[in-house]
Amino acid sequence: MKVSENTKPWTDRYTVEHTEIVVETPELRMVRITLAVGESVPWHWHTDVTDRFVCLRGSLCVETRAPRASHDLAPGEECTVAPKTAHSARNAGEDHCRFLVIQGVGPYDYNALGD
């Protein structure tokens, strides 16, 4: 399935080692993201979708605001972030970090904190 760049609205806001859209429908997305040491996905939020993070490799830290929380994930561990909750994800280790983020159910949007 060929995916157009406009389905990756973050590309003009930040860069990470690698992103791959695994599945994309109008109501559901699955993205595999690799973060190099020191990289992060900056603070943002989604209007309608829930993000489910699943750590595949390395150490992933998912932080949220309101409620303020920090989730340190090892391979096989996961956490969920509700719609309208500001969150960030960062590589918390000393090697590459790879994770899946499953986003749904609903239309995807990316709202950088401050937008």
Image: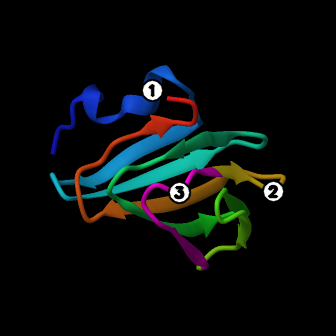
> Could you tell me which residue is drawn at 33 percent across and 47 percent down?
21
Q: Secondary structure at mark 1?
A: helix
The earlier-in-sequence mark between 2 and 1 is: 1
Density class for disc 2 (Cα within 10 Å; few <14, some 14-19, many ≥20) is some
Find out whether residue 85 is within the magenta segment.
yes
- Label 2: element kind: loop
Within the magenta stretch, is there residue 23? no
Q: Nearer the viewer, mark 2 or mark 3?
A: 3
The N terminus lies in quadrant: top left
- The reply to whether discs 3 and 1 touch (Cβ–Cβ < 8 Å) is no
Q: Do tag 2 and tag 3 residues touch (Cβ < 8 Å)?
A: no
Q: Which mark is residue 93?
A: 2
Magenta-tinted stretch: 77-88
User: Residue 40: x percent and y percent?
Assistant: 67, 42
Is the residue 23 above or below the residue 80 in the image? above
Residue type at numbered disc 3? Thr
Q: Which residue is mark 3?
A: 85
Q: Position of 84 compared to 15: left or right?
A: left
Q: Element type at marker 3?
A: loop
Residue type at mark 2?
Gly
- Horizontal side of 79 relative to 32 (left or right) equals right
The nearer-to-camera label among 3 and 1 is: 3
Residue ID for mark 1: 11
Q: Residue at x 16, y 54 (%)?
A: 25
Q: Residue furthest front?
A: 66
- The x and y percentages for residue 12 are 46, 20
Q: Are marks 2 and 1 in contact (CB under 8 Å)?
A: no
Residue 77 image point, x, y percent: 61, 79
The first of marks 2 and 3 along the sequence is 3
Residue in the image at 78% along x and 40% along y: 38
Compare residues 9 and 44 and report the one nearer the observer: 44
